[in-house]
Image (cartoon, helix red, strand yellow):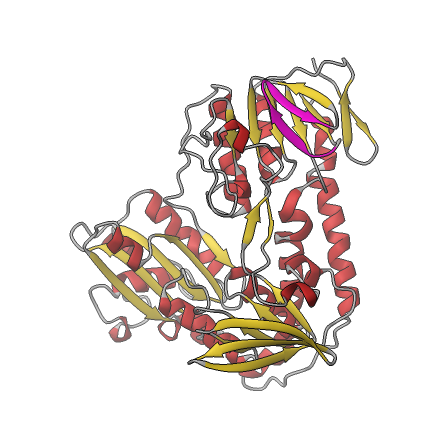
Amino acid sequence: MNQTVKTGDCCSVNKNGDDSYDLIVIGAGSAGFSASISAAEAGRRVAMVGHGTIGGTCVNVGCVPSKAMIRAGEAVHAGTAAARFPGIEPCAQSVDWSAVVKGTADLVDEMRQKKYIDLLPSYENVTYIEEGAARLIEGGIEVGGRIIAAPKVLIATGSRPFLPEIDGIETVEALDSWDLLSLPDQPESILVLGGGYIGCELAQMASRLGVKVTLVTRSRLLPGVEPEVAKALTDALKAEGVAVETGLSYRSVRRSDGGVTLTIERGGKPVTLSAQRLVATTGRVANSEDLGLREFGIETDARGSIKVGADMATTRPGVWAAGDVTDRDQFVYMAAYGAKVAANNALGLQDLRYDNGAMPWVVFTDPQVAGVGLSEVQAKAAGHDVKASVLTLDHVARAATARDTRGVIKLVADAKTDRLLGGQIAAPEGSDAIQTLAMALKFGMTSKALGETIFPYLTTVEGLKLAAQTFDKDVAKLSCCAG
């Protein structure tokens, strides 16, 4: 059996000196580990090739640090938000930005050690190699001047932040999402470029921790989300003091006294916005340029994302890909899932197919925005005769008792069959509520069946039942639990 030995912090070698494996996995993030574990549990020999910090984007610079600091912001905000309850006086919390950042970094180190580095010795069939960037060759890869051979290769090299092409942006030391999360000193003010989920999350987090924030985007916030849901979030951010600038174009960015000035164009007229720092959250680009994909006929899209089929195979026989380096969903849990699909197909273990039909997604703002399945626009584009219901949270008893009715629920169903096609929610507890709808879609429920299902009273998830009933009746005319 292949024995893995750690050398240094997180590097391993094969004691047998044998550089031949059943599968090479390029990348040591969530997708890379998922693929390697799937193969190792099936008794296959795996070479997992890392480059950069082990653990990948999520634990190091993405999900874990961002959500930790978002929670810190929530704790600060709770002191003032308590004033919505009669008889409770608001209290302002003091914030030590540097201490919050350090505590977040300590958590990241702990989780990287526990969930990645410490796992390696548990899988004897996995040899971890960290000798530089890997490049595809016939029959395997070359890394650090060394040839690693395997009949199958799985690429899981992830992605990195994308810097938009704006005149002058290269001169202002723009921050990306990780730069902001690790900034040692608190900025007085920031301009956040990009109204996607990363921009919205970080804008609210920074604002709650005491930073003056202007959120700037060409379209509207969360452009792929239902308009009713996106508006609920936009209204919530504005109510907290985040300046939201939408429907514009970027002209240029320049250094100015004590900070940065961004010139935008709105309605044909230039407008200048200023802040101490500029944060770019305008998407990500695949880490694929140094792999030698073109020489191997592996197709990519405009941002370098590897094109894969439902089996996660690339356009080159013998090469699979998974995670953020592909043109699939950019979520860590889907990266791990796609890697499992890829590894099983590559090694002939199970015939699996990538299926995101009931994939829930979450934006960790407050209110949280979450969804699953098709939006109304997507459902119509897919050829469905669509019906939709929209329920504001003032109809949900949980929201009323919490004195927080910010938000909305929207459901989409096929008008002919009544089968649920998708739904989205903006609510303080939307991330937990959405999983119920994911299960409903997975098992083909109708809106009538969802509306007839028993839900516990005074929960956010009960709003799904009420939204389902809204297709056919006015729930405002029902007494508590009468439906």
Whether residue 319 sits left or right of residue 202 in the image: it is left
Q: Main secondary structure of the magenta part?
A: strand
* Residue closer to the observer: 89 or 481: 89
Q: Residue at x 42, y 36 (%)?
A: 354
Residue lying at the far right in this picture: please name it.
Answer: 8
Q: Is 387 above or below relative to 353?
A: below
Q: Residue at x 63, y 79 (%)?
A: 274
Q: Is 289 above or below relative to 341?
A: below
- Picture quadrant where residue 220 is located: bottom left
189 within the magenta span: no
138 within the magenta span: yes
- Picture quadrant where residue 242 is located: bottom right
- Residue 69: x and y in percent read 67, 62
Residue 404 in sight from this viewpoint: no
The span shown in magenta is: 132-143
Q: Is 266 above or below relative to 362?
A: below
- Residue 316: x and y in percent read 47, 26
* Residue closer to the observer: 159 or 202: 159
* Residue closer to the observer: 267 or 8: 267
